[in-house]
Image (cartoon, rainbow, N blue to C red):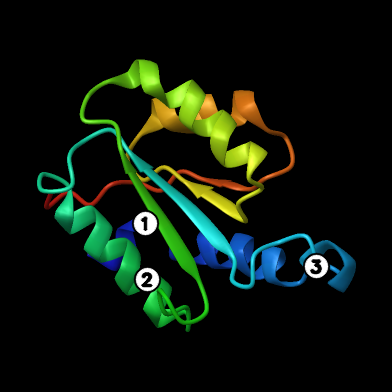
Amino acid sequence: MASYIGRRKFLATLGGAAAWPLAARAQQPAMPVIGFINSGTPHGMSRSAAAFRSALGEAGFIEGQNVTVEYHWLEGDYNRAPALMADLVRRRVAVIATPGFSQGAVAAKAATATIPIQRARASPCQ
């Protein structure tokens, strides 16, 4: 499953965020924060979230130890996406991940030109 979320591109993006200068890091939380946004529900998209966590783990990122993931579920209410993206940008998360949610990637790109956005393909077994 994890191979479907664009692992190499995501890892390159997260690795780039980890290489920020120390001065910039002083303004960031102790751990990089990933904003994970999905259009579904936590129950309905549990495989997508599990694949995401698995890919992070394979890259050496352990949720709660060296990375924080904030999960946001729109539950089909796409009108919430722009406000959510604006909040993530304001809080300066390291990466915004929108797996299988192209409208989320568009909203994220409209909200920021500086925070990396990872729109990975959804797993076909969802």
Mark 2 packing: few (<14 Cα in 10 Å), some, or many (20+)?
A: many
For the N terminus, the quadrant is bottom left
Are the residues flagged by discs 2 and 1 in contact, CB closer than 8 Å? yes
Q: Amino acid at mark 3?
A: Ala
Please tell me in which quadrant of the rendered image residue 73 appears.
Answer: top left
Residue picked out by circle 3: 26
Residue picked out by circle 1: 5
Of labels 3 and 1, earlier in sequence is: 1
Of labels 2 and 3, earlier in sequence is: 3
Give SS at disc 2.
helix
Tell me the distance, in whole angstroms, between the alpha carbons under discs 3 and 1.
30 Å
Mark 3 packing: few (<14 Cα in 10 Å), some, or many (20+)?
A: few
Closest to the observer, 10 or 30: 30
The percent position of residue 58, horizontal first and vertical second, equals 39, 81
Residue picked out by circle 2: 55
Closest to the observer, 61 or 31: 31
Give SS at disc 1.
helix
Q: Identify the residue shown where x is 41% and y is 72%.
A: 56
